[in-house]
Image: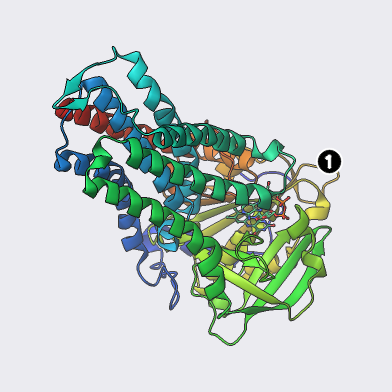
Amino acid sequence: MGIPGRRAWPRKPQSLQLRVAGSSRRPPAPRLSFPGSPAARGDTMSASRAALWPLAYLAAILLPLALALLAGRPGRPFAVELSAAVGMAGFSLLLLEFVLSGRYQRISADVGMDAVMRFHQAMAWVLLVLLLIHPYLYALFPRPTGLVDGLPAAPPADSAVGGASGMVAWILLAALITLSAVRDDLPVRYETWRLSHGFGALLVAVLAAAHTILSGHHAAAPALAGFWIVATALAALTLLRAYVLKPLLLRRRPWRIRDVRALAPGIHELRLTPDGHAGLPYQAGQFVWLRFQDRLPGLTEHPFSLASSPAEGPELRFLIKANGDFTGGIGDLPEGRRALVDGPYGRFGAALEDSEASGFLLIAGGVGLAPMLGLLHTLAAAGETRPVRLVVANADAREIVLDKELQGLAERLDLRVTRVVDDPDRPDGALPGPVDTALLAECLTGAERARWQAFVCAPPGMIDAVEGMLEALGLPASRVHAERFRYRYGLASPSARRNLRLQAVVLALVLAAVAAFALAVG
Ligand SMILES: Cc1cc2nc3c(=O)[nH]c(=O)nc-3n(C[C@H](O)[C@H](O)[C@H](O)COP(=O)(O)OP(=O)(O)OC[C@H]3O[C@@H](n4cnc5c(N)ncnc54)[C@H](O)[C@@H]3O)c2cc1C
């Protein structure tokens, strides 16, 4: 049953649609990878690697505990060893936060940037709790006195510098994480917050390392002291790599602005062309960090989804909505201006490779249309014959862009485009917002609804709501892919619940290892 008033653009002749709809006679779906793209290098491999990252993460947390066991320092009472183990696990988690936020293409291509940033934020709270209770554990349990094997049974208080550095790190860490949680309400520029967050975290790590090495019982073993020094240096290197080394290297592969075009009030299309190199190998739907000046390495760059498809050639295309000082100035950029592009990142479009999918549902909110354009052009270039449904939601009619281009794509694909506009002053054929379950149900046609792949790029609240609707319609969470333009996460959506489960498992394993360590050593 159709939805009254829906705008559906020209489709293929009826005979072709009928042929495509019969799943048993569906022609084999083409593989949607292109030479040089990460997909072409084997996305199935990246999917299996994705499962290994949590294991590598756990191993990295447990490594110092294992080294402490192997170092064989004399054991102390259980409570003291428990506190020491909690401190070591918390410090490992702190150092791993640098890796999670360190923009590693491999990790973001395997796991997705959304999952990485979500995990980074959640683990910050876990490590904060661990490190906050670390000193209190000594007080909670009866305080041991005397000597064990000639060593003080109580926590070492012999290094004033060690104690003070631990306390300052403890206070700074609490401030850093609390400020991040309320960042949107702070009267500071994003760049200022980002700089203070990075260097604040580095300061906490250095102070925590000083505390661990000067006051830690187990870190008196050279192997463990060496481990903490190397791990802290690697964390610092991660920052240096992301903000200084990488931007310097990118200067060797510059890009030039070929065109900036206003599409609607506050929305621009930007095209970049490679300057003296072959371009960027990427997968449709990925994003890059973009910068137009070299003055401050790494600080003035911003993430943008690629609205182009690798099938269209080396030029990169973006859809940018004015949202602040950087995005507000896009329209003033002159043709020929040098640009630096760091990427690609993410795996938003990786599921286009699913040759078993019944169809592809694309849901865009506002400028969330950007990555969808890359996906649509990739599907069209590959001669995709399965149904593709695009839902584009806008606050008002002035934000509607690229109608003609979508009509052209509808000629090449079994594509139906549905416009949803919140403002009562809607153009003909557009549905009233917000996007609802009935509309999505109507898009997911056919008996094999659970085998569609869905892609959502919209404001965070809309992503959470749409994920819930798709779950209610029986689409497994593994088939719903989201790209967020803001790293803000609710707790109620299916993907949030999935991430919470993973975090709970990691936390439970860490706590079990900490307790086992204290029992074994204490
Ligand atoms: C993966 C991803 C893809 C994106 N793709 C697009 C796109 O295709 N088109 C588009 O118009 N917008 C996109 N954005 C949003 C865009 O990056 C921000 O609107 C832009 O960075 C805002 O910068 P500003 O200086 O104009 O505004 P500001 O006032 O500085 O920032 C406004 C808000 O944008 C976010 N932001 C700002 N700078 C950064 C940064 N360096 N890194 C992460 N978040 C930042 C913060 O939440 C901030 O509160 C994307 C964001 C992400 C994370």
Q: Residue at x 66, y 65 (%)?
A: 296
The correct choice, above or below, for 328 with respect to 273 in the image is above
Q: Is residue 349 left or right of residue 146?
A: right
According to the picture, the residue beneath numbered tag 1 turns out to be 424
- Residue 226: give x, y in percent of width and height: 28, 51
Residue 201 visible, this orientation: yes
Q: Is residue 15 left or right of residue 351?
A: right
- Residue 108: give x, y in percent of width and height: 45, 57
Residue 402 is drawn in which quadrant? bottom right
The amino acid type of the residue labelled 1 equals: Pro
Which color mode does the image show? rainbow
The correct choice, above or below, for 288 with respect to 120 in the image is below
Residue 443 visible, this orientation: no
Tell me if mark 1 has few (under 14), some (14-19) or many (20+) residues whose alpha carbon lies within 10 angstroms of its own: few
Quarter of the image where the N terminus is located: top right
Residue 4 is drawn in which quadrant? top right
Per the image, label 1 sits on a secondary structure element best described as: loop
Q: Is residue 54 left or right of residue 99?
A: left
